[in-house]
Amino acid sequence: MTAGIIKKNELLRRWQKDVGDNYCNLIKTRYLPFDKNIKFKIFFNPRRAGSSNYGKGRKCLFCYLKRKKISFGEYFVIANIYPFTRNHRLIVSRKHYSQPKLRDLEMAVEISRLLNRTMILSLKDSGAGIPGHLHFHIYREKMPVFKAPEKFIAANKEISVSRIIFPSYGIVVAGDNLARWLYKITAKMIYPYNLVFYDRKILIYPRTKIFPVKNTSWKFGATELSGLFVVKTEKLFNQLTKKELCRCMKTATLNKSREISQFEKMIKQIVA
């Protein structure tokens, strides 16, 4: 069975009923205004996965998983052990590999569109908890970044590409045949990256290899780059400021003018 055969209501019914939920109502929420249109959202969730949760030198957790799951095509769906919110799921490739293939991107575009959900892909050095086995996070939360203004970069008959005006540097790809164009762009990437899928758009964060926070209770990934922050301690939850959040977001993504210029030149050459 392929992603295209699965009906929206059937997939929703199956994963809400058949794989359970590890959400325990442990989340507290606060908001920090970034500007008049955007508010950063901060969760305190002591169950958030950290860098030590999976250990080192162990067998791949996904390959030896004994928990409830549902299968479709080349993938299976499981409830996240460390959920951010209710019904936080993982879509995992059946085969063990780390770099996304065209079919993976096609699946993510379609599922995100059909279910009106946010999907995130993190690779090695970009916040992935298990970087060696491809998997997508999927949940209901809409990222604050999608309210940010955009600056046009390039376009062709099928897609347009814009830079987001946000503390994190990233580009938004929108239009038709998104998976095919995304595959062309990511094949040329020389940086680690995150992908965020939502509402017929794909956001690409080219990452630096700088981990912006030293606090082990805070794992900095694509959600944080998008303006939604999940921390494991109440102290950090209460202390975070707009200035510190913006510093971390800028540090973790491309921030040097020369690198950004070269990256966008590459994008224009691909899209032309």
Image (cartoon, rainbow, N blue to C red):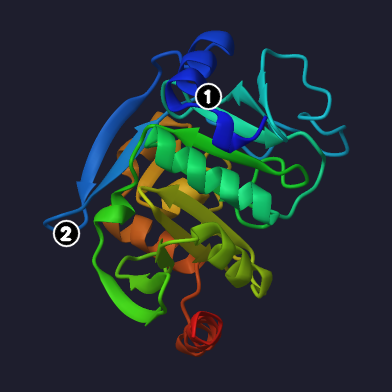
Q: State the image coordinates of residue 71 (x, y, percent, origin top left).
A: 68, 23
- Write the residue at 23% across / 66% down: 149
Q: State the image coordinates of residue 245 (x, y, percent, origin top left).
A: 36, 55
Local packing at callout 2 (Cα closer than 10 Å; few below 14, some 14-19, many 20+) is few
- Write the residue at 45% across / 31% down: 233
Residue 84 appears in the picture as rendered: yes
Q: 34 and 64: which one is in front?
A: 64
Residue 47, labelled with which disc?
1
The amino acid at mark 1 is Arg
Q: State the image coordinates of residue 259 (x, y, percent, origin top left).
A: 53, 85
Q: 137 and 59: which one is in front?
A: 137
Q: In this rendering, would 135 be left or right of 82? A: right
Residue 22 appears in the picture as rendered: no
| Residue furthest left in the image | 36
According to the image, label 2 marks what residue?
A: 35
Q: 261 and 246: which one is in front?
A: 261
Q: Quadrant of the N terminus?
A: top right
Mark 1 or 2 closer to N-term?
A: 2
Q: How far, Cα to Cα, is label 1 from label 2?
A: 30 Å
- Which quadrant would residue 179 be assigned to in this image? bottom right
- Write the residue at 43% across / 55% down: 225
- Check the image and report above or below for 113 versus 90: below
